[in-house]
Image: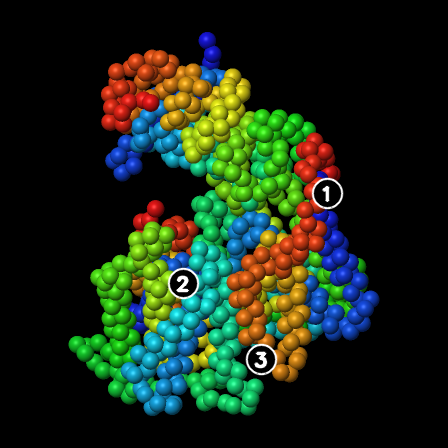
Amino acid sequence: MTITTRGIAESLAYGGFIAAILLLPLVMDDVFWLNRIAKYLVFGMLGVAIALSWGYAGVLNLGQGLFFGLGAYMVAMSLKLQSYTSLQQGSDTPVPDFMLWNAEPGAPTDLCCINQGSFLWIPFQAQWFGIVMALIVPTLIALALAWPIFRLRVSGVYVAIITLAMVLLVRLLIIDAQPITNGFNGLTDLGWLTIGGFEFDPYLVETYYLVAVSLAIALLATRWLVSTKAGLILQSTRDDANRARYLGYNVAAYQVFFFAVSAGIAGFAGLLYVIAAEFASPSFMDLAFSISMVVWAAVGGRGSLLGACIGAILINTIEATASETEVLQEAWKAIIGLVFVLVVLFMPRGLAGVALDAVAWIAPKRKLGPAPLAQQEPAE
Amino acid sequence: MRKPALTIDGLGVSFGGFKAVDGFTTVVNDGELRVVLGPNGAGKTTMMDLISGKTAATEGKVYLYGQEITNKPEHEIARAGIGRKFQIPSIFRDLRVRENLEVAAARETSVFRNLRLGLRKEERDRIEEVIDLTRLGDVLDTRAGDLSHGQMQWLELGMLIVQDARVILLDEPTAGMTQAETLKTSRIINELKGKHTLIVVEHDMAFVREIAERITVMHMGKLLAEGSIAQIEADAAVREAYLGSGGIH
Amino acid sequence: MSEILFIGLSLSSILLLIALGLSITYGAMGVINMAHGELVMIGAYTAVLAGIYLGLNLFFALPLAFLMAGVVGLLIERLVIRRLYGRIIDTLLATWGVAILLQQAIRLEFGLTFFGIHIEGLGPGLQNMAVPGFLTQPFDLWGLTIQPYRSFIIVLTLILTGVTWFLMYRTSIGMQVRAIMRNPQMAAACGIDVRRVSMLTFAYGSGLAGVAGVLLAGFKTVQPDMGASVVVDGFLVVVVGGVGSLFGTLASAGILGQINGSIAVLTNDILARAVVFGVVILLILWKPRGLFSMRSR
């Protein structure tokens, strides 16, 4: 690729960010805060997912919480079955405590038939099943949802409304299925993720690394994805879908593919969040959470994967710090509302836009000239 | 005798009773440059919409090198070999000029086969040729939306050449251009003669004389006359149709 | 059966009143106002405060809430939305920020809590609005049990819908609004003061939200985040009905309200809402421009 000031700055930013999150435990030994930051890194991953669909595909998904929530519930089901609250219910196989509270008198204490639908939990006794499902289910649901949307060429704000209605719909179904989902209360008292005998206690530095490395991989993989030819074609569909069609591209296929990738990332984030936070709740599918994600991305920069990621981490970290400061505890929310308004009004490209402008200003008019196209090597 | 590239057979569409194109039939041969003339509302742009799949035809058929393409989705018609240039330049405004050309290299259209960095050798060579032809070399890193009107038109033309469409539909390629720009455009189009089959809708008669081989005249959605410039200018029916607008200038 | 219809109708009415305002602001100005629910909330608090401090009952609270919400809406338009016309998603995000701000302002009593000052009726707590006695006694008419408060809601909604229709289709300002809906540039070129008309339209739509808030306060507890859920419902009604179509909004509020009401009686409130969301998704997929969309080019 042509070497440009912007390209160098971007590489430095990615490298610096990844180094920073990987080195953080060296300077921060407060496990409580480390666990918190891990959760915010997960939100950063949501920022990446939003920027991919909103910034690159031009598709605003106001229901990203659906995929985050599905990923979270899938893995939480497995971890719930490993928790003492499931193992000590006086049966040979684990049964979640809340299922007993919701059971009909005289129902057998077994996953097969304690409640209507409780058999769905049976395969989740294997932890790998929950993990795999946390990645597959959000992606499949996204495919099923995106296919009709993009085939019928629904676009713009209507996609936002459909996705928003969808997340609220699933949230209600989960709440309504109280006997097998614990309704409003969600899945709590979870066990720990265990890989090869190692237990990922959320307050261990290893768990932090699990999240940080996952984020680094997700960030770089998505960055690679948008640099491919397919990523470029995706951006072209955002600019002018008809032109892309007249060039021979099936625009819907590109939109569906990247929508599903974005959902898969959100599902992965849900999985990691459960490991770090030890609960899954229908609040993941609240309207407020899904819109908040979009706002984080807007503050960080909707057109930049890294910007949206940093935006999410930054807002949440500041929010946590502020809510611990006595004076700001309640006022903080009002301040964040004000910040959203100001960012949309005066910084439409977010922090990333400001950073890019700064780079352009610091390294001005260094005329590199257009490199001949033949110099481009297909980097493998 | 050259083989037919595009065969239009009794093509028609009606919008709520109004027949914008009505039983239109013509055959465009491989490598031919066909100019379509007609007064405003004659159905020229609608005819292009029907060929390229933007509008669904209610009657008739379209064949491309013997393969039927009537009412297929736009991207399938494009893959079959039809490229289209719009009257208002349709380019990817937020992408850079170079990126526009890269997207146009559309030999491979599937998502999964495009999950690779960089371009193939033959695609790069093709883009280089087109950059030479359209003289866009100085603005490769410019955002396409920031180009001048003429440059946008050439970029869109260039994209069609990179796309390597066998049949190219051009809707008023010189609309809104200065004299110098029009001249450059006719040079590009003349360059394409013989390599691609071209169908050009145009009003500017000076430009038409510059490029045309064979002319089709449409009137009220129907074929009115077909022939060389001299034949068309001598045609009584054409004069009749144009009387209201003062004949062909 | 008539009872189901009655509950459905009154649900539809509140929905309609909320959607009516949204339909005007979204249809006329292309603004997705997420703070619309907060304007409903402000209307409800106006009723509560008017009861506490001025001793005014429901009937006096209605115009007061209309004014109050209208003024707040006007401020939102002038300070925020005016800079965002044409950027529909940005209006959604910015007004979401405004919504949070308004909620917190009520919760913190406009920040006065920091100085130890408390205003009765505001704050994080729950409030109720007293409904005048004669509106709470059901009575029989031709063998039907009539719920006076619910009937009052239905009648008032119908009147306000009529007034809105009259304003939009029978007055010169309504004609200007409709001209702006079709083509703001052309409207401006024709000498319409687009800024002023947009501002007034927005204020009127906000005022309707305030009225909806008062009516809602009659059977729901008043709290700072009461508006958050109604805005989505109202918005779905507008989209399903078709942007810019007053009749569409009316029909769609009726349909969705009835579906919600009937299914809630058959199963429960949660499933009823879920079904409504499902129906909305299918309807938008089927007709993205709404059931009764305005033909525009």
Q: Residue furthest left?
A: C142
Residue A5 sits above or below residue A302 on the image: above
Q: Nearer the viewer, mark 2 or mark 3?
A: 3
- Measured as percent of width and height from the top left, residue B201 is found at 40, 27
The amino acid pointed to by label 2 is: Phe
Q: Earlier in the sequence, mark 3 or mark 1?
A: 1
Q: Residue furthest front?
A: B179
* Mark 1 on the same chain as mark 2: no
Distance between the alpha carbons at the discs numbered 2 and 3: 29 Å
Identity of the residue drawn at 28% across and 32% down? B19
> Which picture quadrant has residue C179?
bottom left
Q: Nearer the viewer, mark 3 or mark 1?
A: 1
Q: Secondary structure at mark 1?
A: loop
Residues C211 and C229: in front is C211
Q: Secondary structure at mark 3?
A: loop
Q: Residues within 10 Å of mark 1 (few under 14, many from 20)?
A: few
Q: Which residue is mark 2?
A: C235
- Measured as percent of width and height from the top left, residue A178 is found at 53, 70
Q: Which residue is mark 1?
A: A3
Q: Residues within 10 Å of mark 2 (few under 14, many from 20)?
A: many
Identity of the residue drawn at 72% across and 33% down? A375
Q: Which residue is mark 3?
A: A330
The amino acid pointed to by label 3 is: Glu
The amino acid pointed to by label 1 is: Ile
Identity of the residue drawn at 66% across and 71% down? A318
- Which chain letter goes with mark 3? A
